[in-house]
Structures are given as structure tokens and as C-alpha cells.
């Protein structure tokens, strides 16, 4: 017992703070899912998983599926934890981004890891790069892409972001249809990011629709009572299921046969032009003489390549040249443009180790190696119809990333060029070409070049073909006629053959075809033969390659140029050099050549010039220069391509997202400021008072403070004071030391000290004053009473009274926010809950004007109060009281805090007044 005679409270009455273990248990209890939450999680997994199926034709194998499902689970866990702890959406977004950066390396990319599982700086750079421009690189890559490497970050990000968005929306908003926005967007994205080949029509169409409809029905029934106590529910369910089944079957089987059904698909891949210009590289045909003898390059007897596993007689292809500009045969950016299966043409794209292609013949796997001092060019030697390319060695990864491949021409480009020690494996379908031309062939119609300038060929072609009928027969006749010519590589210096120049421009072709005796090497014969075939209406192209020797060795003398003609089934028939080029030992006749010089003049090569290293040396410089027109260098400082990597990363990945977040933050704060200004300055003075109280309540709701359901202003004020200031101090007991308060004091004997004198009527000491620096009390009850007084008074409040009231509103708002942490205030700043449609008559800026209008108050439903929801409004007083208080104000104001009272009849609204306030609305 204390000195005052008051016993201490028992230990059971003391409130003990929770222990650390109890606090942890309380937080973990929030993670325990309920049945509806598990249902939402299950439908999220189903819908996002179906959307992931769209990548089936984009990636090779099933590795992408496991990575995407792993991302789905990670995104689901992040979103569930954020919703369980009621975190801000921005916080959940940052958590998802952190999960992508931390887990994307060991789960998806699996490259450049520390100790095999910790992401490094290079891993972070790869993940950030794939998240932004990686989608465009995927669209420009040739599908199917390997299920390994950096591209695996994309399905991981797709699943993570899709699950986080879908489940986050489902947990934060109760709408049934709103939860389907994210999965439907994911489904559309997976389709447009895919290929022309559908991944799974039945799964992505019918199954997705059934799952989505089922989820919508379940979410709709959660907040809606069963009609007729559940009677007829089974009948409705069976009927709905039957209708869905009929619609699904009809749409899947009957829909494609209806008039107007278009079987084409719209995907980004078909409309995106890959950013790779292959015309920047010189044509290999223009440098054919470097492999001949005599030549300063001395590559005639040098080993260029070694090939292991290639059947004998199968040619090795350097490049297929399907474009002719009047100067040179070269590889075009788009093959078969306007013709073939793909009318838009096939381009050079990034490929993986697997290439989706099919061709005739047997499947062969061979290994190609580059010895020291061997082949060094940008054109990748391959063979047949390529289905796989796998680089090995120290530069394997670099060459794989650098490779661009055209599946129509089976031509690969390596801007870094092959070098000594490089090795790669090629898998392809091959056929051994015949030694003789076939008797018949069903060739296609058309041409690959512009034939309007090829009229000079007719003088020779017409006599060669006038005795045969049929396009293929004419092409074969031209091949036989060409073999009657002579072969020359220009001869040694000072030899009479020096007058036979290299090149295959229109001028050189005109000289070649108009001479008495045809003379040239593979370059002139192949170029002329391809032009003649196109002139005859048969699409043809030139191929530069080699015929490996018996041991798989490729030397300079094995390099040849031949022609391929297109057949009606869109395949290409090779016509090897041995079938239309004369024998190398058949040299031109010197007497005939001198006779030609008398007619046309001797062709003297121009003097040698100092050409750039990238320009092929030779007298016909024009044809080489056309392929080397480099665009002017862009020095614009505003072009991001000219920025250093760290600046681009800072601007696009830090400053730009931060600017977007600040813009969103500013837009929300600006909308709230406009709403507060409108409430303060618009409408009658009573409506401004009502708007001021609503501003206080909206501030509390944004801060997520508890408010009583359908409470009056005074009830709301008391609830906020209790939340902010805490419970009031307990009242003193009426019994002190066993005596009643106010009892007369006993007489004091003489000689004893008199007790300390106190103020009359005080029996307990006055509470100590508030310590300096402590927060002032909220004092919201007087503000609520003032609002009731202004609203329910007979006369309109004056402008000075409204200004004083809003001064109290601003002070109350500052006091409400001052007790919150920085993150709580930030969450309140970006909260949109006071704009959402949660009121009986709507919400937001426009519905708020209707709620404060006197001209047309809403009629309450029968049996229900006209009071609004918690924290928004209050009711008008009872009009039955008629006493007036000492101030002369109507006694009805004393009942202003009774719920369920309207202000109808309290006083008559003034006439000809627009947008006046309903005074009972807070």
C-alpha cells in the first residue's frame, strides 16, 4: 500500500507489452491465407500460366516454361506478402523489381554468377538490359530461341510481373472484372510477341475463357447474397456451363469456317524490321580473284578451312547472293521479297543453336575449323539447309552473339570475322548434287533482279535458246553454250591475258557477252548465267562457296561460284560451276583477243590507288565502293547512342523512372489541392463548411485512421481524438484515504502544524502542465461542433466564420499528419481511396458537387437512413425540438450528432440558388 493509503493495482490489471516472439507471431499470422485468397492465387497461377504458353513457338525446348513458372511463383509471393502487410503499391513494385534482379540471375540467366548462385555486376547489367531493349532483340531474333542465356530473363520477368499484377489487383480491388485486366493483357502480349504459328489455340482460347469466366463468377458471388436462399443455384450453374460449352465448341470448330474468317495473325515480329544492314559488307564474289593463281594473296594452295563429317561432293556455301544493283551481286537485306512463303521477305536475324528449318535430304552434322592463316571473312561457311549452329572455342560466346543468319538463303554473317582457331558445328539437311543437269525441272516464274537493263544479253541468248522450248530447257541450253568459252584469271604480269579484267558490273558483263569468245573465270560466268536466267523468267541467284577435297580440306583452288535457280516448290536447284564454266585449262585464243582489241580498243587497267583496307583491290573500283557507303557519323549530343553506357543507364533506368514517379505523385497531389480549393471557395458558405469537414475526414481516411460506421461529426471527432491523442486520463476517485471528497476537515489541535491550504473546492492536485515541445491535442470535437452549428443554423454563416473554420481545418489536418511517419504520409499523399466510387451517390470531383447540391437531394430508400458511409457524412438534426438555447440558435442544433437525421424541414432552402450544400452531409 502506498503512503496515500491507496493500494497498488494487482499485476493482472497491468498491461504488459508484447514480447518479441509475440510480435513476430502476430506478423506471421498475417501471412496465413484464407480460402478466398487461396482461390485467387490458384486462378492467378492458371491464367498467367496459360498466357505463358504463348512463348512455346518462340523458344526451343521446355526450359523457358520452368523459368516462367518460377517467375510466376516469385511474383505471386511478393504480391501476397505486400497485400498481407497492406504495403503501398509502390513498395510492392519495388519488391518485385528487387526480386527480379536478385533471383533472375541464378534462376533464369545463369551466367556470370559468383560461386554459382550469387548475381554479379555483369548479371545485373544483363537483367536490366533484357528488361528494356531485350524484348526488341527477341523480336528480331530468329525463332525458336535457345532456352538458355540472357533471353531466359524475359519469360521470368513475364511470369513475375504478370502474377504480381494479377494477384495484386485481385487483393486490392473487389471488382470481379477488374482482376481480369492484367491476365488478358498478358495473353495479348504473349500472342503479339510470338510467331505466326499459333502456340496452342485451344488452351489460349477456350481454356483461358472458361477459367476467366469461372473466376469472375466466384468473385461476383462473394459480396452478393444467394437469391431465394440459394434455390435454383444448381439449375443456373448447369445452364451456364451448357451455354459456355456450346459457345466454346461452336467458336472453335465452326468459327474458322465462317465467311470472312482470316487465318493470318498480327504479331510484332512480322512488322518489325531488324536493325541489321548486311549490304555494308563487301560481296565475296567481287574478291574472287584472291583465291586464283597467280595472285598476290597467294591463297590458291593455302588451306583455308577444315571440314569433318561432311559427305563427299556436298558443296560448302560462303554466301548466297540474291541482289544485283548493276555493279555487283550481293546479299540483300530481305530475301524473296514479295515471293515465297513469306511475302515480306526473310531477313538476317540473330539465332541460337537451334534453327527451325526443314529441307530435303539426310541430316548431317559436321565440324568446321579455321587453321592458322586460313579463311578470314564476315561470311560464315555452311552447307545444306541449316538446322543448328554451335560455336566452340574461346570466342564461342562472342561469335554466337555476333551471328546473324538468313534462313531462306542459309547465309550467315559474322561482323567480327572468323579467325584462326575458331571452330563450330553445323547441323543441316543435305543432298549431293548430280554431276549432270537434270533433263526436266519445274522451275518457278519471275526474277530476283530488275531485267529491264539486260537487253544486251539477247544478242547471244537468242541463238542459244531458239531451238528449244520450255524455261528449264532454255536455262540448260545456256549452260551448255557457256562451256564453249574460255577460262582466264588474268594471267601473270605482262601476259596477254591481263586485258581480261575482273568484275561483273553491267559494263563488264556487256564486254563479256559481246566478245567473239567468252573469256573469264567463275565470277564472270556465274554472274552472267544468273542474269541470263532472270532474263528468261527464271529466278536465279549466285552462290559463292567451295567443294572440299576428299580429306575435308578446303584450299583456295577449291573456291568456286555457281548458280541456283528457284523451283516451283520454293526450293533452289544448284547448278555447279563444273556444269557451265569452261575447264580451267581452256585459255582464250590470243589471235581472237587481238581482233577484238582492234574493234573496241584495248582495255587497260587503271593505275593502282591507295584504297582503304576494307575496299577490295581491283580495277573495277565502282562495284566495290557501292557496298561500302558508310553513313555519316552522328555527333548529336542529344542522341542517346552517342552517350557513354553509364550515362544511358543513369538516364533511362534511374532518372526517367524517377521522373515518372514524381509526375504521378505531383498529379495526385495536384488533384487533391484542386479539390480542397474547390471545397473552400465554391458554393454557398454552408457548403464550404461541409467541404471543410469532409477535407478533415478525407485526410484521416488517406492516413487509414479508424472511423465509426455511419458516424456523426462528433462521433468521428471523438474517434479521431482517441486514435491520435490516446485515451483520456482516468478520473480521480471520490474516496481519498477512506474519506469522501468534500467532507469537512477535522479540527487541528493546538500546537500542531496546520495542513497545506488549497484552493476552495479542490481535493486533488491539478494535473501538471504539458511539458515543453509536446504535441498539442487534436481538439477536433470543438471543430465538429462548430461545423454542426454553421450547417444547422437558420442563417448562412458569414465569410469570416467560414475563414475561421477553415483555419481550424488546416490546423487539424496538420495535427493529423504530424503524428505519422514519413512513409505513412507518403502513402496518404498517393492514396486514391477518397476518389474511388465508394459513396451511395458516387465519388470523385464531379459526384462531390452533386452531393453538396441543395437543388436535388437524393431520396433515401425505404427503411434505410440517409446517412452516408463511415467517415464521409453525418445526418441532420431532428426537427421536432423547438427550444432555443441561450445564444438564440435553434435548439435543433443540439441534436446535430444524431445518426439517421436529414436536414429536410430544418429550414427552407433559398430560391434561385444553385449548387447549395445539403447541410446534413459532412
Image: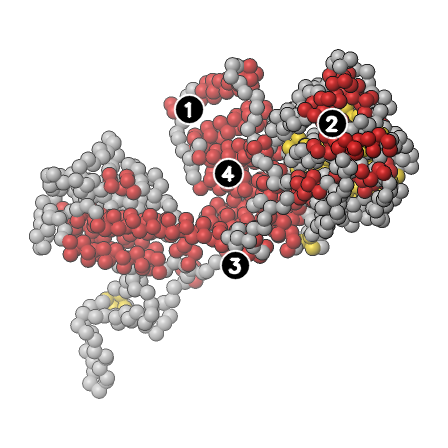
Of callouts 2 and 4, the N-terminal one? 4
Alpha-carbon distance for marks 4 and 3? 34 Å
Alpha-carbon distance for marks 1 and 3? 47 Å
Where residue 335 sits, quadrant-wise, is top right
Would you say residue 250 is visible in this rendering? no
Residue position marked by numbered label 1 in the rendering: 230
Q: Nearer the viewer, mark 2 or mark 4?
A: 2
Of callouts 1 and 2, the N-terminal one? 1
Alpha-carbon distance for marks 3 and 2? 85 Å
Left or right of 132? Residue 63 is right
Determine the secondary structure under disc 3. helix
Dot 2, crowdedness within 10 Å: few (<14), some or many (≥20)?
Answer: many
Q: Nearer the viewer, mark 4 or mark 3?
A: 4
Task: Report x, y in % for residue 697.
Answer: 30, 50
In the rendered structure, are the residues bearing label 3 and label 2 in contact, judged by CB atoms less than 8 Å apart?
A: no
Residue position marked by numbered label 3 in the rendering: 20
Dot 3, crowdedness within 10 Å: few (<14), some or many (≥20)?
Answer: few
Question: Toward the viewer: 243 or 752?
Answer: 243
Residue occupying image coordinates x 52% and y 59% = 20
Residue 530 badge: 2
Q: Nearer the viewer, mark 3 or mark 2?
A: 2
Alpha-carbon distance for marks 2 and 4? 58 Å
Vertical arrangement, residue 772 with respect to residue 28, above or below: below
Of callouts 4 and 3, the N-terminal one? 3
Left or right of 336? Residue 684 is left
Of callouts 4 and 1, the N-terminal one? 4
Would you say residue 838 is visible in this rendering? yes
Question: Toward the viewer: 125 or 80?
Answer: 125
Residue position marked by numbered label 4 in the rendering: 166
Of callouts 1 and 3, the N-terminal one? 3
Amino acid at each position: 500500500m502506498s503512503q496515500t493509503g491507496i493500494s497498488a493495482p494487482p499485476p493482472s490489471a497491468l498491461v504488459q507489452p508484447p514480447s518479441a516472439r509475440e510480435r513476430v507471431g502476430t506478423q506471421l499470422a498475417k501471412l496465413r491465407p484464407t480460402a478466398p485468397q487461396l482461390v485467387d492465387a490458384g486462378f492467378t497461377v492458371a491464367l498467367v500460366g496459360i498466357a505463358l504458353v504463348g512463348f512455346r513457338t518462340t523458344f526451343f525446348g521446355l526450359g523457358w516454361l520452368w523459368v516462367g513458372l518460377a517467375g510466376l511463383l516469385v511474383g505471386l509471393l511478393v504480391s501476397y506478402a505486400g497485400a498481407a502487410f497492406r504495403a503501398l503499391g509502390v513498395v510492392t513494385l519495388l519488391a518485385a523489381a528487387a526480386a527480379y534482379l536478385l533471383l533472375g540471375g541464378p534462376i533464369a540467366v545463369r551466367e556470370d554468377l559468383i560461386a554459382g548462385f550469387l548475381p554479379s555486376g555483369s548479371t545485373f547489367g544483363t537483367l536490366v538490359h533484357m528488361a528494356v531493349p531485350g524484348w526488341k532483340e527477341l523480336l528480331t531474333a530468329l525463332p525458336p530461341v535457345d532456352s538458355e542465356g540472357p533471353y531466359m530473363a524475359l519469360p521470368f520477368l513475364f511470369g513475375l510481373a504478370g502474377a504480381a499484377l494479377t494477384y495484386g489487383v485481385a487483393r486490392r480491388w473487389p471488382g470481379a472484372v477488374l482482376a481480369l485486366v492484367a491476365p488478358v493483357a498478358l495473353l495479348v502480349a504473349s500472342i503479339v510477341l510470338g510467331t505466326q504459328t499459333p502456340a496452342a489455340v485451344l488452351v489460349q482460347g477456350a481454356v483461358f475463357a472458361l477459367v476467366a469466366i469461372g473466376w469472375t463468377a466466384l468473385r461476383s458471388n462473394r459480396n452478393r447474397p444467394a437469391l431465394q436462399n440459394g434455390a435454383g443455384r444448381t439449375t443456373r450453374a448447369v445452364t451456364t456451363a451448357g451455354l459456355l460449352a456450346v459457345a466454346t465448341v461452336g467458336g472453335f470448330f465452326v468459327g474458322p469456317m465462317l465467311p470472312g474468317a482470316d487465318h493470318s495473325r498480327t504479331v510484332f515480329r512480322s512488322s518489325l524490321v531488324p536493325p541489321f544492314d548486311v549490304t555494308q559488307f563487301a560481296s565475296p564474289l567481287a574478291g574472287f580473284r584472291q583465291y586464283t593463281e597467280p595472285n598476290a594473296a597467294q591463297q590458291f594452295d593455302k588451306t583455308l578451312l577444315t571440314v569433318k563429317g561432311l559427305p563427299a561432293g556436298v558443296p560448302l556455301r560462303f554466301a548466297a547472293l540474291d541482289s544485283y544493283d548493276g555493279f555487283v551481286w550481293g546479299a540483300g537485306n530481305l530475301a524473296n521479297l514479295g515471293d515465297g512463303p513469306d511475302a515480306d521477305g526473310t531477313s538476317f536475324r540473330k539465332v541460337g543453336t537451334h534453327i527451325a528449318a526443314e529441307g530435303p535430304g539426310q541430316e548431317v552434322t559436321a565440324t568446321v575449323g579455321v587453321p592458322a592463316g586460313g579463311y578470314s571473312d564476315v561470311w560464315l561457311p555452311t552447307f545444306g539447309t541449316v538446322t543448328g549452329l554451335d560455336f566452340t572455342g574461346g570466342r564461342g560466346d562472342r561469335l554466337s552473339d555476333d551471328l546473324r543468319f538468313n534462313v531462306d538463303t542459309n547465309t550467315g554473317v559474322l561482323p567480327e570475322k572468323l579467325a584462326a582457331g575458331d571452330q563450330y558445328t553445323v547441323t543441316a539437311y543435305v543432298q549431293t548434287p548430280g554431276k549432270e543437269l537434270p533433263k526436266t525441272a519445274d522451275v518457278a516464274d519471275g526474277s530476283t533482279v530488275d531485267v529491264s537493263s539486260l537487253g544486251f544479253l539477247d544478242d547471244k541468248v537468242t541463238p542459244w535458246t531458239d531451238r528449244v522450248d520450255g524455261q528449264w530447257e532454255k536455262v540448260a541450253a545456256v549452260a551448255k553454250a557457256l562451256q564453249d568459252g574460255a577460262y582466264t584469271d588474268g594471267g601473270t604480269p605482262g601476259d596477254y591475258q591481263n586485258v581480261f579484267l575482273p568484275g561483273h558490273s553491267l559494263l563488264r558483263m556487256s564486254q563479256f557477252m559481246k566478245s567473239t569468245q567468252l573469256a573469264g573465270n567463275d565470277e564472270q560466268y556465274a554472274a552472267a548465267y544468273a542474269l541470263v536466267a532472270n532474263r528468261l523468267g527464271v529466278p536465279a541467284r549466285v552462290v559463292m562457296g567451295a567443294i572440299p577435297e576428299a580429306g575435308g580440306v578446303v584450299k583456295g583452288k577449291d573456291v568456286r561460284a555457281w548458280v541456283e535457280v528457284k523451283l516451283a516448290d520454293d526450293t533452289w536447284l544448284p547448278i555447279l560451276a563444273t556444269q557451265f564454266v569452261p575447264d580451267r585449262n581452256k585459255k582464250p585464243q590470243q589471235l581472237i583477243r587481238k581482233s577484238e582489241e582492234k574493234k573496241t580498243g584495248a582495255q587497260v587497267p587503271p593505275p593502282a590507288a591507295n584504297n582503304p583496307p576494307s575496299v577490295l583491290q581491283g580495277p573495277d573500283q565502282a562495284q566495290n565502293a557501292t557496298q561500302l557507303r558508310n553513313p555519316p557519323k552522328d555527333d548529336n549530343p542529344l542522341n542517346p547512342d552517342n552517350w557513354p553506357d553509364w550515362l544511358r543507364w543513369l538516364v533511362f533506368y534511374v532518372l526517367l523512372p524517377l521522373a515518372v514517379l514524381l509526375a504521378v505523385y505531383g498529379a495526385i497531389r495536384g488533384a487533391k489541392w484542386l479539390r480542397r480549393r474547390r471545397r473552400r471557395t465554391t458554393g454557398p458558405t454552408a457548403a464550404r463548411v461541409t467541404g471543410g469537414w469532409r477535407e478533415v475526414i478525407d485526410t484521416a481516411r488517406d492516413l487509414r485512421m479508424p472511423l465509426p460506421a455511419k458516424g456523426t461529426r462528433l462521433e468521428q471527432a471523438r474517434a479521431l481524438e482517441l486514435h491520435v491523442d490516446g485515451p483520456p486520463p482516468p478520473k480521480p476517485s471520490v474516496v481519498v484515504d477512506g474519506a469522501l471528497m468534500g467532507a469537512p476537515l477535522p479540527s487541528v489541535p493546538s500546537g500542531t502544524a496546520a495542513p497545506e491550504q488549497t484552493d476552495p473546492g479542490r481535493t486533488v492536485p491539478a494535473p501538471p502542465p504539458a511539458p515543453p515541445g509536446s504535441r498539442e491535442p487534436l481538439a477536433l470535437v470543438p471543430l465538429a461542433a462548430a461545423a454542426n452549428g454553421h450547417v444547422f443554423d437558420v442563417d448562412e454563416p458569414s465569410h469570416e466564420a467560414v475563414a475561421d473554420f477553415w483555419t481550424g481545418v488546416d490546423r487539424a489536418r496538420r495535427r493529423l499528419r504530424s503524428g505519422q511517419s514519413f512513409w505513412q504520409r507518403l502513402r496518404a499523399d498517393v492514396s486514391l481511396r477518397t476518389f474511388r466510387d465508394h459513396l451511395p451517390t458516387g465519388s470523385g470531383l464531379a459526384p462531390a458537387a452533386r452531393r453538396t447540391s441543395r437543388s436535388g437531394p437524393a431520396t433515401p430508400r425505404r427503411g434505410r437512413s440517409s446517412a452516408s458511409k463511415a467517415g464521409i457524412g453525418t445526418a441532420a438534426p431532428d426537427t421536432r425540438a423547438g427550444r432555443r438555447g441561450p445564444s438564440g440558435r435553434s435548439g435543433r442544433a443540439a441534436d446535430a450528432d444524431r445518426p439517421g437525421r436529414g436536414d429536410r424541414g430544418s429550414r427552407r432552402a433559398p430560391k434561385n440558388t444553385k449548387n447549395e450544400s445539403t447541410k446534413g452531409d459532412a
